[in-house]
Image (cartoon, grey):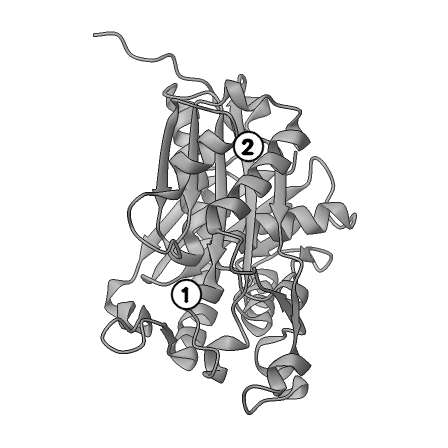
Amino acid sequence: MRLATPVAGARLLGIGSFQPDDVVTNADLERRVETDDAWIRSRVGIAERRIADAETSLPDMAVAAGRAALADAEFDSAELDAVVVATCTMPNPIPNAAAQVATALGANGIGAFDVNAACAGFCYGLGVAADMVRAGSARHVLVIGAEKLSDWIDWDDRSTCIIFADAAGAALVGPAESDEAVGVGPVAWGSAGDHASTIRILEESTNKLHQEGQTVFRWATSAVAPVALEAIDRAGLAPADIDVLIPHQANLRIVEAIAKKLRVKGARDDMVVADDIVHSGNTSSASVPMALDHMRTAGRVRSGDVLLLVGFGAGLSYAGQVVVCP
């Protein structure tokens, strides 16, 4: 039996993202539910979020983000070997998003599958893609986190409607032919199924997303930093080596708590910390790649920077890895 020829590892070749045009501010939500700008900002740090219209589907957003990542890498979609879409908000479990996305991008006949690890989905998908490339089962894999959370939100529930939004973010993963060129570190991941009920769809009643916010907050502020440190260790680095921290944009207070704990463990004071949630809301699996794309566009992240990505959410599921910015 012949095995595929492995390579030293994987690296990021390009990134991209997509957001709908419709901006929903905190003032807009004040007219629907009992809330106000100060209350929302103090609890989750969000000022505004983007919501897709009825004509824009989740695969549509995934295609737009994927196309942007391919353009960033100057890569022809016809050369792709696989598309992985991380999502938890497809309207139906069948068909998946990835096959539709691959075809729309002009990458017919390639491997295409979805990954559902909710807000950790992109980091899970990136870990799988990097292993595919390293093992030789694929050379170029497009990983996309895409969510249309607005379809699953009760817009009269102030505990969720203020938080979630729609978007997609993508990264092209390709081979690193030498140890020195490796740009995606080993994934550190896990799950906590005993907390499965804290974020779930209430199928028996409204078929809408329910979240036990305080429980999730306590879990995230205590459990995520150790995962981040494990990812750093698996990459053979120290906290002081991290230039940019990009955790899932769930809640600005959670983001700040994770950064604080990493600095206690040796991360630098000048480590840049993603705060994309302020203007994008919580976009689940799209949040990590989109935050990276926005930060690079704004000049807060530069090519060659060492980035720590960490996703966490429903499942509960969590994952992280160190990557080098393309």
Residue where numbered disc 2 is placed: 172
300 in relation to 65, above or below:
below
Query: Outermost residue, right direction?
Result: 299
Please tell me which of labels 1 and 2 falls first in the chain.
2
Please tell me whether mark 1 or mark 2 is closer to you in this view.
2
Q: Is residue 151 left or right of residue 92?
A: right
Q: Secondary structure at mark 1?
A: helix
Residue beneath the point at 71% across and 51% down = 295
Q: List the residue tagged with mark 1.
A: 223
Q: Is residue 96 left or right of residue 39?
A: left
Crowding around mark 1 (Cα neighbors within 10 Å: few <14, some 14 to 19, many 20+) is few
Amino acid at dot 2: Leu
Quadrant of the rendered image containing residue 282:
bottom right
Is 289 or 302 nearer to us in this picture? Answer: 289
Whether residue 242 can be seen here: no
Residue 93 placement (x, y as % from top left): 29, 51
Q: Is residue 46 above or below residue 36?
A: above
